[in-house]
Image (spheres, grey):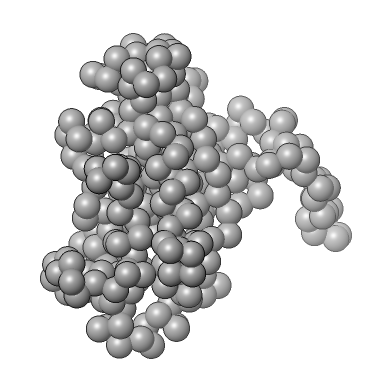
Amino acid sequence: MSLVVSQAVDSPLTRAAIFLVVAPGRPAPISRDQGPAPRAGHAGRPAVSHARHAARHVLELAAAIMSRLEDAATVVDEVHGFKFFDERDLLGFVDGTENPTAQAAVQATLIGDEDPGFTGGSYVIIQKYLHNLKAWNALPVERQETIIGRKKPSDIEQRPFDKASYAHNVLTNIEEGGQQLQILRDNMPFGQVGKGEFGTYFIGYARSPDRIEKLLNNMFIGNPPGNYDRILDFSTAVTGGLFFVPGVVSGRCGSAGREGVNFRKL
C-alpha cells in the first residue's frame, strides 16, 4: 500500500487530521501485571506525521503509516484534529481569514526559480499549542479582540489605527522591502474534555523557511523585542518542527514546475 497522499496546495482544506509524533525505537512490551513498561529514552528529535484527508479515511491512513513503522518507531503523542464551528478555533475566532488563494497560494508556498534544485517543494512548520481556555474565556470580548486584531462575532478586521502593536494579526503580517510575504495556514483545533486539554495544531506552508522564522520571531521575541504576541499569555507551544516537503508530479518525487504540483503529505 502506498503511503503517498497527494493533495494540491490550493485544494480545499480538510475537515479532520491525525497528528502522530514518532521517535526511533520499538514500543516497550506490555506486562499483564505491571501495565505498560516505561519507554527507553529516544535518541534524536521526534518526527511529526501529519495525516490530513477526509474524516472517514484519516484513521485508516494513520494505521497504515504505523503498520509500516512499527518495527522502527514508537508513537509518543497522538492528536485528533477537527474543524470547528464556522471555521473558528477554540478561542472563538475565525481562523485562516487572510490565507492566500488560487495562484497567490501557489506563489506563497511553492519554491520557485530562486532555488532551482528544490523547485516545486515547500517548507512546512507544525506546532502544537495548548490553550488555557479558562483564563481566555474570563477575558472581556473587547480584550480578546484587541489581542487578535479582529472582531469576534463578525470576523471584521479592526481598522489599522485601532489595532494594538502586539495584536496577533499585526505581528504575523510579514513584510520585506514593503512587500507582504504570505504563508498558507491550515490549523486544526483539538481537545479532550475529560483531560481538560484543548489546543490548536498550527500548520504553515511557505516557499522559504525565512518567512516562518520571521513570523515566530515576531510572535515570541516581539517586534520590537518585548512587544510579543499576547496570545502567548494563553497559548503554549509544546512541540513542533520544520520540514522540507519535496514536490510530486505523476506520483514521482523531484523537481517540478509550479503548475499541478502536489505535496507529499507524510
Q: Is residue 155 above or below residue 260?
A: below
Residue 95 image point, x, y percent: 28, 58
Vertical placement of residue 20 versus 165, above or below = above
Residue depicted at 47% across the width and 20% down the height: 2
Residue 54 lies left or right of residue 127; in this view the side is: left
Q: Position of residue 104 (x, y in %)?
A: 20, 35
> What residue appears at the point 68 percent right and 42 percent down from the top-left corner?
45
Q: Nearer the viewer, residue 190 or 106?
A: 106
Query: Does residue 13 appear in this view?
Result: no
Q: Quadrant of residue 157?
A: bottom left
Tally of numbered discs? 0
34 sits to left or right of 245:
right
Using the image as rendered, state which of residue 181 and residue 18 is in the foreground.
181
Does 108 appear above or below 130?
above
Q: Residue at x 43, y 63 (%)?
A: 224
Residue 97 quadrant: bottom left
Residue pushed farthest front? 177
Q: Is residue 42 visible?
A: yes
Measured as percent of width and height from the top left, residue 182 is found at: 29, 43
Task: Identify the residue at horizontal 48%, vertical 55% (top origin).
Answer: 217
On the picture, is 260 further left or further right than 59? left
**Does 173 sit above or below residue 259?**
below
Q: Position of residue 40 (x, y in %)?
A: 83, 47
Along the horizontal axis of the image, is 216 left or right of 100?
Answer: right
